[in-house]
Image (cartoon, coloured by chain):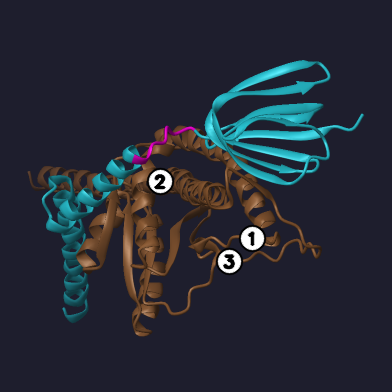
Amino acid sequence: MEMVAASKMKKAQQRMLASRPYSEKITKVISHLANAHPEFTHPYMKEVGELKRVGIIIISSDRGLCGGLNTNLFRSLLKEVADYQAKGIEVEICTIGKKATSFFKNLGLNIKSVLTDLGDAPHFDDLLGTVKVMLDAYDNDEIQQLSVAYNRFENTMTQVPTTAQLIPMVASESESMSHHWDYLYEPDAQTALSALLVRYIEAIVYQGLVENIASEQSSRMIAMKSATDNAGDMVDDLELVYNKARQAAITQEISEIVSGAAAV
Amino acid sequence: MSMIHVDIVSATESLYSGEAKCVFAPGSNGELGIYPQHLALLSTLKPGEVRVETESGIESIYVSGGIVEIQPNIVTIFSDTAIRAHDLDESKALEAKKRAEEAMLDADSSHDISSTQAALAESMVQLQMISKMRGKKI
């Protein structure tokens, strides 16, 4: 299983790297946009006044046996959820993966949408419905903030539970272009911006999903490796116990024979 | 002659990246011809052909819609991989909602398995604790 996970991890990593250009480029465009001075401010870019409900998209794996991967993510999320609830803010969630679905269902949180059985190579289309549910909720003012939570793939040994806010967009402070400029929009500002922002959000969620799959496979590889090692240690220990027992039995038998012979 | 940097990406791969003399893209309001020092522009794309004229020849790439961002020296084209239609998205959203309702109602058997597994893990931990406590007392 370690070997299987290792080969799957390689593929998952490739997929992750392949989708990176898209999300990097679109993030760049968004940061250009944040520095431009659009004639029309899209709702996704406005700061909302009061937070009443927040939405979180939680990405987990479908299968277990991958070490503490999901548990770590859920633990950090539970803390966040408790923080929100302490402030009187309700939490609406959307789960991707069976583990998150069953975990958060047991907690009694309101699940707005569910996506499971994605397999190792998820399609971009698979996400559209789930993301749309959350965006619709935002448009209808059912939630005032949306974030995504997943395991970021650092390297084979480390995966970091991460929560990133999607909307309203956090203004980036990277490049400050002081002069006043704006894009030309076709067909019009609203259509072009919504098309771009929706794609941006989907790209970030998709990136989170493929990173989570890479994390899952590498975490499983490590978990299975340590399971194999532990089983090996156990075999060594048991072999020692067995040999001792065998030797004791032989010694006893010999001493019985010897004492029997002496009695004759 | 000044050149323009072109990146064409889709969600799953990078389709083209390099310098070009000019680019033609199927904008939603008509064909866009983009030369260096173009005005900053943001447009949606129709399905069609993107032509990139480089020094060595013309590259032709098909996009099924998407978005183009133009900065004076950089053109970025985001090609859609998914087929988008309002009705289709709507029905997918409904499906996702339905799955959520099913999960909440516990109708799906696969979730039963995972919740049973969770319960099993919990009682295993309890058993371990009990045996530890016993070990201490005796």
Chain in brown in the render: A
Viewer-nearest of discs 2 and 3: 3
Nearest the eye: A8 or A194: A194
Quadrant where the image shows the C terminus of chain A: top left
Q: Secondary structure at mark 2?
A: helix
Q: Is residue A52 magenta?
A: no
Residue A175 sits in quarter: bottom right
Quadrant where the image shows the N terminus of chain A: top left
Residue lying farthest to the bottom in this orientation: A87
Using a 10 Å C-alpha cutoff, classify the residue at mark 2 as few (fewer than 14 neighbours), some (14 to 19) or many (20 or more): many
Viewer-nearest of discs 1 and 3: 1
Residue lying farthest to the right in this orientation: B1
Chain part drawn in magenta: B81-86
Tell me the kind of residue under disc 2.
Arg
Mark positioned earlier in the residue sequence (2 or 1):
1
Give the side of residue A62 with respect to residue A150, left or right.
left
In the picture, the disc for residue A39 is 1
Pointer 2 chain = A
Disc 1 and disc 3 on one polypeptide chain: yes
Q: Which residue is mark 3?
A: A170
Q: Secondary structure at mark 3?
A: loop
Q: CA distance from mark 2 to mark 3?
A: 34 Å
Residue B34: x and y in percent read 75, 32
Residue A50 sits in quarter: bottom left
Q: Colour of chain B?
A: cyan
Mark positioned earlier in the residue sequence (2 or 3):
3
Tell me the kind of residue under disc 3.
Val
Tell me the kind of residue under disc 1.
Glu
